[in-house]
Amino acid sequence: MNLSRRSILGATGGIAALATLAACGSNSGGIGSSTAPSSAGTSAASGASSGGAKVTLQQWYHEYGEAGVKEAVQKYAAAYPDATVKVTWNVGDYNKKLSATLLTNDVPDVFEAEQGGSLDMIQGKQIVDLNDIFDSVKDQFNPKVVDRFTFEGKIYGIPQVIDMQLLYYRKSVLEKAGKQPPKTLTELVDVANAVATGDMGGFFAGNDGGLGVLGTIFIWASGNEQLNADRTEATFINQNFYDGLKAYGDFYKNGKGLLKAASKDWYDGTPFAQGETAMQWGGLWSMPDIQKALGDDFGVIAFPAIGSSGRPAVPFGAFGSCVAAKGKNIDAAKAFVKWLWIDNDDDQVDFANSYGTHIPAKLSLVAKADKLASGPGADAAKFVADNGFTNDIMWSGALGEAYGAAVSNVITKGADPAKEFASVAQKAKDELKRLKG
């Protein structure tokens, strides 16, 4: 399976661990789209320097689904004046290939990594911290992304571009039914049931009924965090969280407005764009195609608040540019990363704005991305700053799987949430203790 930006959120509920965020890889996430034709290969920046032969840097990217990305990153590399940068475009399972390569002595100097590097990479000393090039400009970047990229005071990747999930709604359909965009889960259920017809569902969040992609959104939207500040235990084991799961479980089993089977899955905007559903949970990457299909007849909101302590929530993620600890030219690699992802505003805007719709990581550049300048795009960018959440770096795959199984049992089988999540709470303690070593 190709790594895609849909996976940046990794395991939102443990169920959809490998298909949760953005628009690249094996499916570009657009309406009726597929991966743009491309092949693995390299491109080298060339040219002589006044000091003689240039340092050569190896830079890795995963395969992006949007047409033109490969050519763009090759162009950026070729423009760098202080080193020869060879770009490798990795088709296939990038995550697996990267993990294996980092265990060898033949590593890329610079490479993309989900959320700026994994806990394994950090604890295994496979990547170096970048505080020396980042601390002075930290305030220029989206603080939610910086927080996620930082572990124990050190940042291990420079954010490249932000992707997110959000809720699309059809303005004309809601207006005809006399309904406003929902602000709470209760309202979401009410609106979905009210607007559903024999030809159009009310709400769609995947062909599994939303179990996978909505996973940990139930935590954040109910006003909770995944883990406590010390990362020793789960902090969402409470009645407000349970009530949210029960409410969605009732909707799952009895709500006529929940569409459970559509022509495409949640990450593709087709069901919403062609009128299969009045509301769809999806990705920012689908917005250009939805705009082509519906014009101004749609809006976007965050996932509605759950319960009295709830809050709106959107998951976001970003790839970060990392420097390998075993690289042969660490200082030169840092200088290149700084040039491209900190200093080079024009290329950062181009990368975010020219190939699909994404959010620049630097706050000052958001307004320069014309797809985010107004309307739903501007709303989406604001959601990340105000309502953005992402999995904690210590939310492991094993913990995500245990959590996802419990969510599924409560929603689909009506299991007692207190009993189901007692084991999840213990699993969290065990996993966090193990990860801390």
Image (cartoon, rainbow, N blue to C red):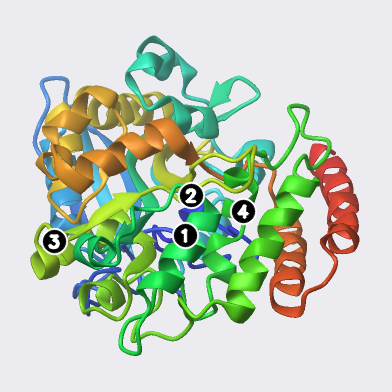
Spatial distance from mark 3 to mark 4, Cα to Cα? 28 Å
In the rendered structure, which amino acid carries the disc numbered 1? Leu
Q: Which residue is mark 2?
A: 304
Q: Position of residue 404 (x, y in %)?
A: 70, 65
User: What residue lies at 54% left-to-right and 36% top-to-bottom?
Assistant: 127
| Closer to viewer: mark 4 or mark 2 | 2
The residue positioned farthest toward the bottom in the image shown? 198
| Residue at mark 3 to residue at mark 1: CA–CA distance | 23 Å
- Foreground of the two, 428 or 166: 166
Q: Which mark is nearer the camera, 2 or 3?
A: 2
Looking at the image, do the residues carrying marks 2 and 1 touch, with CB atoms under 8 Å apart? yes
The kind of residue tagged 3 is Gln
Amino acid type of disc 4? Answer: Phe
Above or below, 81 against 245 in this view is above
In this view, the mark in front (4 or 1) = 1
Give the camera-side residue of 50 and 375: 375
